[in-house]
Image (cartoon, rainbow, N blue to C red):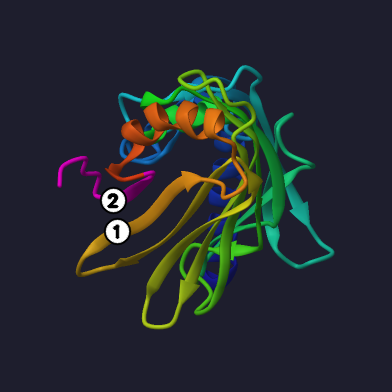
């Protein structure tokens, strides 16, 4: 009899919790995300169960808001046995993004997205000074917040038709950046040029002890004519420390010898 009472109380509590979530205002989610996160929700409406909000990308003080709202709805995923799953949708994504919550952290489903390169302004110096244009193609695999892969890519970003209002050369080129994991809790960042008049290359790594360290180079392509090389010089002065026709890229950012 006592076991039945306990089960009945637990059932009532579960029903009460589900009912509360169904009507809990979506704006409560604004307080859930940490302020320092590079993604924030703005003007949320609806409920925690089903609602919408604008997305602001970038660190505090430099965020840029995407024009279309993000919508979400909770569903129960019986096929993959993930249980309650939040399906988020946004026009920039190729399809719905599943987020599953469990004892082993939050699992984010694999997805692709397309964003305007102007959002790179939120990255701060020196990128914000060049007024970037073009578009960004993002892709990532299934990820779990408490169990990142020991080795492999976390995020791939391709910058297509890259441009800058500070230079007459357009487009500058197409570039790819890959954020990946290596053993011993090391995160790496590699940047390469796929094609273009401006050649970019660099590698960085993040460790718990030292944080982020990145070094790279930017220079005109070997086949660039004299007029193109001359036009790229002001841009090279903005993004790094000049050494002849090449600029040294460094993070933490430094433009001094």
> How far across and how far down the image is residue 153, in percent?
58, 67
| Residue positioned 35% across, 37% down in the render | 239
Please state the extent of the stretch shown in magenta in the rendering: 245-257
Whether tag 1 and tag 2 are in contact, CB under 8 A, the answer is: yes
> Is residue 172 found inside the magenta-colored segment of the image?
no
The front one of 180 and 238 is 238
Residue at the spot of label 2: 251
Q: Is residue 257 above or below residue 144?
A: above
Q: Is residue 257 above or below residue 229?
A: below
Q: Badge 1: few (under 14), some or many (20 or more) residues near its Cα, within 10 Å? A: some
> How far across and how far down the image is residue 104, in percent?
51, 70
> Is residue 246 found inside the magenta-colored segment of the image?
yes
Left or right of 190? Residue 156 is: right
Specify the label residue 50 is tagged with. Answer: none
| Residue positioned 48% across, 71% down in the render | 181
Q: Is residue 206 above or below residue 69?
A: below
Q: CA distance from mark 1 to mark 2?
A: 7 Å
């Amino acid at each position: 009899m006592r076991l039945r009472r306990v089960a009945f109380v637990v059932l009532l509590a579960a029903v009460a919790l589900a009912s509360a979530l169904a009507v809990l205002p979506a704006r409560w989610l604004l307080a859930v995300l940490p302020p320092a996160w590079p993604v924030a929700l703005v003007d949320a409406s609806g409920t925690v169960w089903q609602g919408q909000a604008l997305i602001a990308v970038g660190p505090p003080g430099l965020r840029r808001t995407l024009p279309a709202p993000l919508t979400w709805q909770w569903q129960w995923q019986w096929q993959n046995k993930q249980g309650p799953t939040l399906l988020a949708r946004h026009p920039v994504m190729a399809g719905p993004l599943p987020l599953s919550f469990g004892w082993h952290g939050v699992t984010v489903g694999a997805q692709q997205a397309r964003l305007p390169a102007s959002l790179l302004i939120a990255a701060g110096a020196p990128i914000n000074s060049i007024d970037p244009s073009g578009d960004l193609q993002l892709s990532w695999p299934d990820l779990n917040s408490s169990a990142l892969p020991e080795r492999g890519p976390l995020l791939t970003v391709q910058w297509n038709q890259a441009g800058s209002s500070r230079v007459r050369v357009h487009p500058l080129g197409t570039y790819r950046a890959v954020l990946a994991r290596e053993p011993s809790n090391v995160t790496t960042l590699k940047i390469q040029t796929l094609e273009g008049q401006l050649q970019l290359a660099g590698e960085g790594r993040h460790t718990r002890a030292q944080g982020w360290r990145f070094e790279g180079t930017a220079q005109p392509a070997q086949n660039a004519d004299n007029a193109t090389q001359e036009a790229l010089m002001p841009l090279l002065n903005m993004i790094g420390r000049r050494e002849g026709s090449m600029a040294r890229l460094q993070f933490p950012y430094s433009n001094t010898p």
